[in-house]
């Protein structure tokens, strides 16, 4: 997770509720070098997991990751935190310090077409689904 670290100072574990979660969430990018999130202000994506809670080994590990700008994506809804699984600091996605490796719990691949949203015919959704931004940013960056 962080350059030079031994072992696994952070991990994903069972949701704090102990239950599987399947719903849509709003997300906001953090201060990171994550190339997958360039130009993204907010994302609306589905989550579907029983083991999505991000935890760190200790406060020191958490601070190292924050200082390195690895908190790439956070749960956020209606002006406040909406942390469905109990992740440390509302983390939904992490990047390595270079910004080239991105791990996240929401599923952007499940929202690359408008028809993948369960209310696509009833809501005024964006023309370009939010999941597509992540993939288009990756292709643009790595093809440059």
Image (spheres, rainbow, N blue to C red):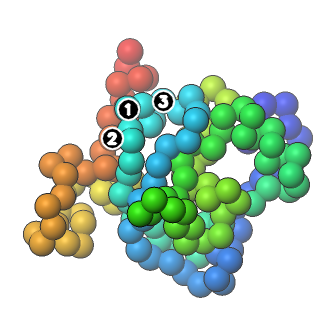
Q: Are marks 1 and 2 in contact (CB under 8 Å)?
A: yes
**First in sequence: mark 3 vs mark 2:** 3
Q: Can residue 106 be seen in this view?
A: no
Residue at 39% x, 48% y is 42
Q: Which residue is drawn at the image coordinates 19% and 52% (left, top)? A: 126
Quarter where residue 45 is shown: bottom left
Mark 3: few, some, or many residues within 10 Å (few <14, many ≥20)? many
Q: Compared to 99, does 125 lie above or below?
A: below
Query: Residue 29: x percent and y percent?
Result: 49, 43
Residue bearing the label numbered 1 = 39
The CA span between labels 3 and 1 is: 9 Å
Find numbered disc 2 in the image and state the secondary structure of the residue it sits on: helix
State the image coordinates of residue 33 (x, y, percent, origin top left).
56, 29
> Residue extending furthest top?
144
Crowdedness near tag 2: few (<14), some (14–19) or many (≥20) residues, C-alpha within 10 Å? many
Depth check: 139 or 62 in front? 62
On the rendered structure, is 85 left or right of 48? right
Q: Name the residue under label 3.
A: 35
Q: Name the residue under label 2.
A: 133
Disc 1 from disc 2: Cα separation: 9 Å
Q: Which part of the image, by quadrant, shows the C terminus?
A: top left
Residue 79 horizontal/vertical position (percent): 45, 59
Sequence-first tag of 1 and 2: 1
Q: Residue at x 89, y 41 (%)?
A: 6
């Amino acid at each position: 997770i962080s350059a030079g670290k031994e072992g696994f100072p952070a991990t994903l574990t069972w949701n704090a509720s102990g239950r599987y979660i399947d719903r849509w969430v709003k997300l906001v990018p953090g201060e990171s070098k994550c190339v997958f999130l360039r130009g993204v202000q907010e994302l609306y994506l589905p989550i579907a997991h029983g083991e999505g809670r991000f935890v760190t080994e200790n406060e020191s590990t958490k601070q190292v990751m924050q200082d390195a700008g690895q908190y790439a994506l956070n749960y956020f809804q209606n002006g406040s935190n909406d942390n469905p699984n109990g992740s440390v600091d509302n983390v939904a996605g992490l990047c390595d310090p270079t910004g080239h490796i991105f791990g996240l719990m929401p599923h952007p691949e499940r929202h690359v077409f408008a028809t993948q949203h369960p209310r696509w015919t009833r809501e005024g959704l964006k023309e370009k689904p939010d999941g597509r931004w992540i993939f288009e940013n990756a292709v643009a960056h790595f093809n440059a």
